[in-house]
Amino acid sequence: MAFLCCTVLVLLCFFDSASATFIADMDYGGVPLWINRLLGEPSVLSLQGRMDSAWFRANNHQACPQQCDCPIQWPTALYCDHRGLADIPDRLPDRTQYLFLQLQTDTLDQAALQNQTQLCYFFANHNRLSSVPSALPVGLKQLRLAYNQISSISRGAFRNMHNLTLLLLQGNRLQTIKEGDLKGLVSLNLLDLNGNLFSSVPRHLPRTVQQLYLSNNTLSGLDEDSFVGFHNLKYLRLSHCGLQSRGVHPQVFNFSSLVELDLSYNKLTTIPTVPTTLQYLYLEANEIQGFNVTSFCREVGPLSYSRMKILRLDGNKMSYQQLPPDWVFCLRVLESIYI
């Protein structure tokens, strides 16, 4: 039986610690905001110190809190960030859809936000919040609370937030998520829990999530049912989690919805079993010593092969010469492999 395979670009690389550098976006929390520029988009940078606020006020006749900037170019955006505010400014404009807010406090005056019926994008990264506040505007589509001091989620915080698609909680102090904490998030697509204090994959997460980020948590291991029920999960990040092969169940990642899996910068000694539908696998900077074709293909045939496009194995304890001769029949659509 003949098999078709394509030419694969093999790159021999060395581990570069510089590739691990992560720069947190001060306003967006590390995840870009994709907005139609024809409709107007808030700047990625704060306007503080970039334009004269007196000029803004002289030329902008719309109401604007004294402590904030209301750009003429983006009348739906309100910048109250990086000003060392202690409280939410009074009389926020009703037109506000994008609110950038940094406060020197561990709580929010929720009454000041409840009436913001037009608010869709709330940026409260880099504050001192100790918990996810309750009674936030129910119309929110994106809530960014990255790099706070959050250790708990207020009871009923998300009860009526049916439109929320993105929730950023990375860089906080969460250790667990209790049943009911995220109840109400029926549309959530992206959940970022990077850089918290989880020792295991938290239970009770919304099953609608397609992108789940758990990097930079110290995970003791992964059970067979760690991701059971996540039928829509496509992108999973678990880098820098201290994972070891003996603590990772062989079938934990073997579910067909998965498209991209990041297991880089762990302590894995073997390649885990992944679904044949997986397209991107990042295993750089582990302790992997060999290559097992069955990790990617349980069988090989005309219709039985891996859809893998990019495979990173650089920074491990193996070389290109250790690849078995039949690996190309399994990874026949591979575009790049890094060793």
Image (cartoon, rainbow, N blue to C red):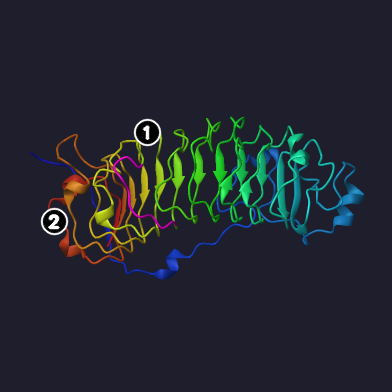
- Residue lying at 87% horizontally and 51% vertically, measured from the top left: 66
Q: Secondary structure at mark 1?
A: loop
225 magenta-colored: yes
Mark 2 or mark 1, which has the lower sequence index?
1
Residue 264 position in % (x across, y down): 36, 58
Rate crowding at label 1 as few (under 14), some (14 to 19) or many (20 or more) other CA atoms within 10 Å: few
**Is 10 in front, or is 290?**
290
Q: Where, by quadrant of the figure, is residue 212 drawn? A: top left
Residue receiving disc 2: 324
209 magenta-colored: no
State left or right for residue 257 relative to residue 317. right
Residue receiving disc 1: 229
Which is the main secondary structure of the residues drawn in magenta? loop
- Residue lying at 32% horizontally and 69% vertically, measured from the top left: 14
Residue 125 position in % (x across, y down): 64, 53
State left or right for residue 247 relative to residue 300. right
Q: Amino acid at mark 2?
A: Pro
Which quarter shows the N terminus? top left
Q: Are marks 2 and 1 in contact (CB under 8 Å)?
A: no
**Is 292 in front, or is 147?**
147
- Residue lying at 56% horizontally and 43% vertically, measured from the top left: 167
Q: Amino acid at mark 1?
A: Gly
Q: Magenta part of the protein: which range? A: 217-226
Q: Find the distance from the CA under tag 2 to the CA under tag 1.
A: 35 Å
Q: Secondary structure at mark 2?
A: loop
State left or right for residue 21 relative to residue 152. left
Residue 53 position in % (x across, y down): 85, 56
Which quarter shows the C terminus? bottom left
Residue 246 position in % (x across, y down): 24, 55
